[in-house]
Image: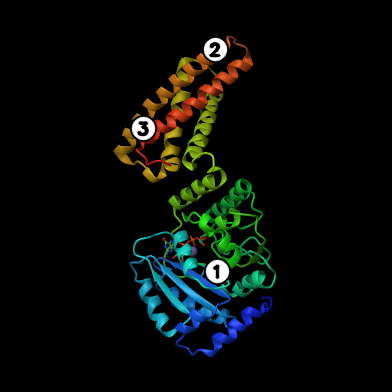
């Protein structure tokens, strides 16, 4: 461990001294001073972990003025109650119990909104994030002027710990996608462990879209490019309870990436649909190449393979929120076929029309006509599939 950073900002030091004047009961203290860091802990079924984490935070932050805010979404295991009991002993701790809203990112945003610190930190309750680097993260902002400091598994000194190959791959893949699509220079943009400066928070919080697991990305890509410091840490094993990062969260993450990357022009769902459509074209070509013939049967086989492929991926990805299973999937698949047939009609007739209008059958004209027909059919089919096949709400 490197030595803790010294806090040089004079306003912060005086805030710290003011804090010391109040006794351990503390409520007045929180109102009348600005802690150097507000640590937000989002929790869902973390009753066993919270007391341990709070104890570790007290130790790690003993040299700086801090507050801790637990944001619990009415956990069935009564995490909020455990936290509230702790808060009667620990005046720096407060608890937000949400009974309506749900979700990790929105919980973090609720905690940030209630926070009064000069810097705003978030870490998981399950002890996977090493709280001992928190002073370094805070120091990177207060002493070195960074806008965001990230607890990073990719920075020197960091590692994925005992992550299995699959989780490691998912995290790595997500990070690479984010880096390419959003051009963020951060090596671990998926980290759920980070600190933002109050200035950065004020600048971008209204633009943050509190969906899914990618809250750090929002702070990185909204607004002007931030100065970022990454501090390595080893990702620990979850101590108690289970992860909430399931397949659907990965899908939500991909959708959110699409939205962040292109959401200003088209909806994330349409982008997903178009990507699936393109992959279907590849499937169709592969079947044709594989069977090396253009006989009628192979031609139909190739189309059918692409339709099945597209349905599966649209069901699992594009329209994941409306995913069909069992009989509903069979009905959906039938409808999807109907829409696909309609699309073929639209695409061929639109391209015929273009060729007709231009009055030439040269290769470039045919290519443009085909693309125009495909684009039209894609947009049309998207809307039909949305309203008929999946009956999805707009967006
Ligand atoms: N309030 C609230 N509401 N908290 C939640 C919710 C929710 O709906 N879902 C999860 N949490 C809390 C958990 O209780 C935990 O403290 C923290 O958010 C992270 O949830 P985990 O379920 O432990 O996530 P993970 O360990 O699989 O994922 C971690 O690593 C990812 C990258 O590999 C998180 O840090 C992610 O943010 C990160 O992207
Ligand atoms: Mn976790």
Quarter of the image containing the N terminus? bottom right
Residue 324: image quadrant is top left
Asked whether disc 3 touches disc 1, contact meaning CB atoms under 8 Å apart, the reply is: no
**Residue 106 point in image, percent of width and height:** 45, 60
Q: In the rendering, at what x and y percent does residue 244 appear?
A: 43, 59
Q: Residues within 10 Å of mark 2 (few under 14, many from 20)?
A: few
Across and down, in percent, residue 260 comes to 54, 48
Checking the image for residue 357, the label placed there is 2
* Image location (x, y in percent) of residue 340: 42, 26
Q: Secondary structure at mark 1?
A: strand
Q: CA distance from mark 1 to mark 2?
A: 61 Å
Q: CA distance from mark 3 to mark 2?
A: 36 Å
Outermost top residue: 359
- What kind of colouring is applied to the model shown? rainbow
Q: CA distance from mark 3 to mark 1?
A: 46 Å
Q: Is residue 197 visible?
A: no
Is disc 3 surrounded by few (<14), some (14 to 19) or many (20+) residues within 10 Å? many
Query: Is 361 drawn above or below residue 285 in the view shown?
Result: above
The vertical placement of 263 against 114, above or below, is above
Q: Quadrant of residue 308?
A: top left
Disc 3 versus disc 1: nearer the observer? 1
For the point 48% across and 62% down, which residue is it? 109
Query: What is the count of numbered marks?
Result: 3
Quarter holding the C terminus is top left
Between label 1 and label 2, give the one nearer the viewer: 2
Q: Residue at x 48, y 64 (%)?
A: 108
The residue where tag 3 is placed is 333
**Which residue is identified by label 1?**
121
Q: Earlier in the sequence, mark 3 or mark 1?
A: 1
């Amino acid at each position: 461990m490197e030595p803790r950073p010294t806090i040089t900002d004079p306003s912060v030091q005086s805030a710290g001294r003011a804090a010391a004047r109040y006794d351990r009961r503390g409520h007045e203290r929180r109102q009348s001073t600005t802690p150097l860091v507000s640590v937000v802990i989002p929790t869902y079924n973390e009753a066993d972990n919270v007391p341990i984490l709070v104890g570790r935070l007290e130790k790690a932050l003993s040299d700086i003025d801090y507050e801790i805010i637990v944001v619990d979404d009415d956990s069935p295991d009564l995490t909020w109650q455990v936290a509230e009991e702790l808060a009667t002993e620990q005046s720096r701790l407060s608890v937000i119990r949400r009974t309506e809203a749900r979700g990790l990112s929105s919980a973090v945003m609720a905690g940030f909104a209630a926070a009064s610190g000069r810097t705003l930190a978030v870490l998981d309750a399950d002890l996977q994030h090493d709280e001992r680097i928190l002073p370094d993260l805070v120091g990177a902002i207060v002493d070195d002027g960074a806008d965001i400091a990230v607890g990073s598994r990719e920075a020197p000194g960091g590692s994925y710990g005992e992550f299995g190959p699959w989780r490691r791959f998912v995290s790595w893949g997500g990070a690479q996608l984010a880096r390419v699509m959003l051009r963020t220079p951060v090596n671990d943009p998926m980290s759920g462990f980070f600190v933002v400066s109050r200035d950065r928070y004020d600048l971008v919080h209204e633009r943050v879209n509190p969906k899914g697991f990618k809250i750090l990305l929002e702070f990185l890509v909204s607004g002007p490019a931030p100065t970022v410091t990454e501090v390595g840490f080893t990702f620990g094993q979850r101590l108690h309870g289970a992860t909430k990062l399931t397949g659907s969260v990965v899908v939500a993450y991909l959708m959110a990436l699409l939205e962040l990357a292109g959401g200003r022009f088209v909806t994330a769902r349409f982008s997903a649909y178009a990507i699936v459509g393109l992959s279907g074209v590849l499937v169709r070509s592969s079947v044709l190449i594989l069977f090396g013939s253009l006989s009628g049967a192979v031609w139909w086989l190739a189309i059918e393979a692409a339709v099945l492929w597209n349905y599966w991926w649209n069901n699992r990805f594009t329209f994941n929120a409306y995913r069909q299973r069992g009989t509903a999937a069979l009905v959906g698949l039938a409808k999807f076929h109907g829409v696909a047939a309609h699309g073929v009609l639209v695409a061929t007739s639109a391209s015929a029309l273009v060729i007709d209008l231009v009055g030439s059958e040269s290769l470039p004209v045919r290519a443009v006509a085909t693309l125009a027909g495909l684009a039209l059919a894609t947009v049309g089919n998207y809307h039909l599939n949305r309203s008929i096949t999946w009956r999805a709400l707009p967006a």
